Amino acid sequence: MAMALAPFLAHTLPPDDVTVQLRPAQARLVSVAEKEALIRSGVSYGELLTPEALPTAAQTRAYAGALSRNGARVGELLAALTAAVLREYDQPVLVSLARAGTPVGCAMRRLARRWAADFGTPELPHHTLSIIRGQGIDRAALGRVRAAHPQAPLVFVDGWTGKGSINETLSSSLPEDVPPHLAVLSDPAGVARHAATHDDLLLPHAVLNATVCGLLSRTFVTAPGTLHAARVETELRGEDRTGEYLNALDALSAAYTPDFVLDAGPRPQQPVRAVLARAAELGVTDPHLVKPSVGEATRVFLRRQPAHLLLRDAAHPDTLHLRELAAASGTPVTMHPDLPYLAAAIIASGGQE
């Protein structure tokens, strides 16, 4: 069935890799401090947007380091996840959750396309759409995907899990006839249907935002019932690494075949409880202020006002950038060798995401 195109965003994601189900709109632009104050007053996080700054030297170093250090493993994880999806479903469609899932979905589509040519396996159509905690999945965008692929099973793709909030939002906001099949590269929360690993590790695109996702901003809502929106961070065009990153992921996964299987390791059992207990020791009892996993902790430092950083290992290379960001912002850091995640960040009291 033909599908009308969404209003075009001048993003830099390759059109052969993904159909972007987002519309251009004017966001309510606020500073981080203004955002925190508005959230405390009851305004939804999904209605606010802070323009992205140029990536800092710390971010750039962390991205390059993660790509060099973890790149081979990320390629392995991509192959394992793609192969698992192709084994489980008949003619599935990837629906990545913008933005952390978008590069993953693009890489999975490229890998499946290569396998289709070489081994006769199905290709994986790929759409990306918005999901916002407190707002739910973008039902308008989901309707467009379903109209384009009637009866096809949908697999929702993200980069990593933290507390499992996105999985909960997915489960609670999808129509009853759409199973919440979530597939992620890294699932330290232990909640995803498909996980390449349950280890907490730093994916390279966790330390950058728009510049590895087609210059797309974080998604936001402006009117009920319409497509969720994004803006293109045009001022970052000179720093855009989207093509470079997708090509790197393509190369890192190139050696694998569709029969590849990887043991994800034991599924964690309610690891969030231990993090919330540590936060409570610091006087923080609101779970919305606690962001476990190295990916989520990184996002707190890039987009929110951090109040505290918890680390499992002071010398772990995947969290050295967090120590640097904490030092730059004057955020206290404490070590907890029994932490089930590599890191967790606590947001300054009052905000929710």
Image (spheres, rainbow, N blue to C red):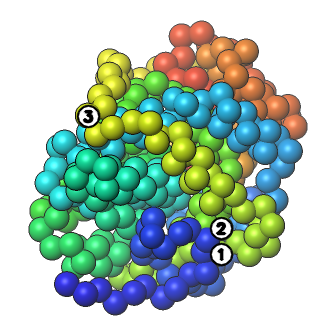
Residue at point 42%, 55% (across, down): 110
Q: Position of residue 145 (x, y in %)?
A: 28, 73
Specify which label sits upstream in the sequence, 2 or 3: 2
Compute the Cα span from label 1 to label 3: 38 Å
In the image shown, does 247 or 127 lie closer to the viewer?
247
Q: Is residue 201 above or below residue 224?
A: above
Q: Is residue 89 left or right of residue 285?
A: left
What label does residue 171 carry, if any? none
Q: Which amino acid, by three-letter code, is at mark 1?
A: Val
Quadrant assignment for the N terminus:
bottom left
Q: Is residue 245 above or below residue 298?
A: below
In the image shown, does 201 or 36 lie closer to the viewer?
201
Q: Examine the image and state in which quarter residue 215 appears.
A: bottom right
Q: Which residue is mark 3?
A: 259
Specify which label sits upstream in the sequence, 2 or 1: 2
Residue extending farthest to the top is 337
Q: Secondary structure at mark 2?
A: loop
Compute the Cα span from label 2 to label 3: 34 Å
Neighbourhood count class around disc 3 (C-alpha, 10 Å): few under 14, some 14–19, many 20 upward: few
Q: Position of residue 146 (x, y in %)?
A: 22, 73
Q: Which amino acid, by three-letter code, is at mark 3?
A: Asp
Q: Which residue is mark 1?
A: 232
Residue at point 78%, 45% (across, down): 60
Q: Is residue 243 left or right of residue 198?
A: right
Residue at point 53%, 69% (across, down): 14
What label does residue 215 carry, if any? 2
Q: Position of residue 46 (x, y in %)?
A: 53, 66
